[in-house]
Amino acid sequence: GAVVSQHPSWVICKSGTSVKIECRSLDFQATTMFWYRQFPKQSLMLMATSNEGSKATYEQGVEKDKFLINHASLTLSTLTVTSAHPEDSSFYICSASPTSSHSYNEQFFGPGTRLTVL
Amino acid sequence: GQQVMQIPQYQHVQEGEDFTTYCNSSTTLSNIQWYKQRPGGHPVFLIQLVKSGEVKKQKRLTFQFGEAKKNSSLHITATQTTDVGTYFCAGRYAGNNRKLIWGLGTSLAVNP
């Protein structure tokens, strides 16, 4: 149990286009999902906390108009990188915490999406 | 601010040697978690420590939480090649139960 899927697993796009990444909790409900960015051989950088039915909470320095987050249901959150540029190329990973109180502390991670902007 | 420091950044050992990674926070943590990320993979939850002075074991892995709940360690006894990967600690602070503050990770390489 506790599987998180992410789609697509990799994407290559041209500069100026927008890319949508989906994060789904497959066998549990997640009130909260998290979006991270990871550069090669570096730690995870939390970008934003996605809350079902409300606005996402963005970390300092992350442009909310650049990285649009929508958490429309208890099993799906999307991250849209708008007007992507080469510097947005990175590994984007989502994670989800089950809504059930006994296990809400553990985060389950999706497999990640590798974005390359040409 | 809330920050979790993790050392060392890299560790290269011979198979069979022990390995330890350390995490430290300047302020008290409510709990701390450990994750392992294999090369090319995503982080996988290993364990959560909550109580002051807590020690938990998973086969060859021993996790400790300091008495002041400001530091933690992961010790691997007799490393194997399957232990290769990056080990991250991630801490939570009181008042923000869901947000994790991540250490920079320790990358472990094991020579067979």
Image (tube, coloured by chain):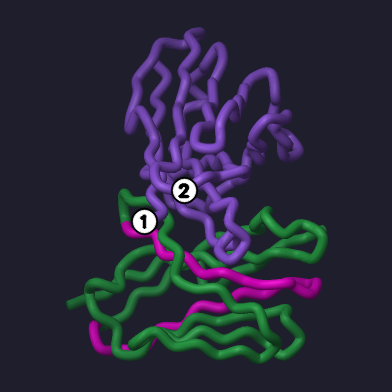
The crowd level at tag 2 (other Cα within 10 Å; few <14, some 14-19, many 20+) is some
The magenta-colored residue range is B15-38
Q: Is residue B3 left or right of residue A114?
A: right
Q: Residue at x 25, y 89 (%)?
A: B16
B22 is within the stretch colored magenta: yes
Residue B103 visible here: no
Number of numbered discs: 2
Picture colour for chain B: green
Residue that sits furthest to the top in the current view: A16
- The disc label shown at residue A28, or none: 2
Q: Which chain is purple?
A: A
**Label 2 – label 1 distance at C-alpha:** 8 Å
User: Secondary structure beneath disc 1?
Assistant: loop
Q: Position of residue A64 (x, y in %)?
A: 70, 24
Q: Residue at x 60, y 62 (%)?
A: A105
Q: Chain of mark 1?
A: A
Q: Chain of mark 2?
A: A
**Image quadrant of residue B24?**
bottom right
Q: Is residue B31 above or below residue B65?
A: above
Looking at the rendered structure, the kind of residue marked 2 is Phe
Kindly identify which residue carries mark 1. Answer: A1
Q: Is residue A75 above or below residue A3?
A: above
Q: Is residue B35 above or below residue A3?
A: below
Q: Return the disc, 2 or 1, that comes first in the chain's sequence.
A: 1
Q: Is residue B5 above or below residue B22?
A: above
Q: Position of residue A71 (x, y in %)?
A: 59, 30
Q: Which corner quadrant holds the C terminus of chain B?
A: bottom left
Towards the viewer: B112 or A12: A12
Question: Badges 2 and 1: C-beta atoms under 8 Å apart?
Answer: yes
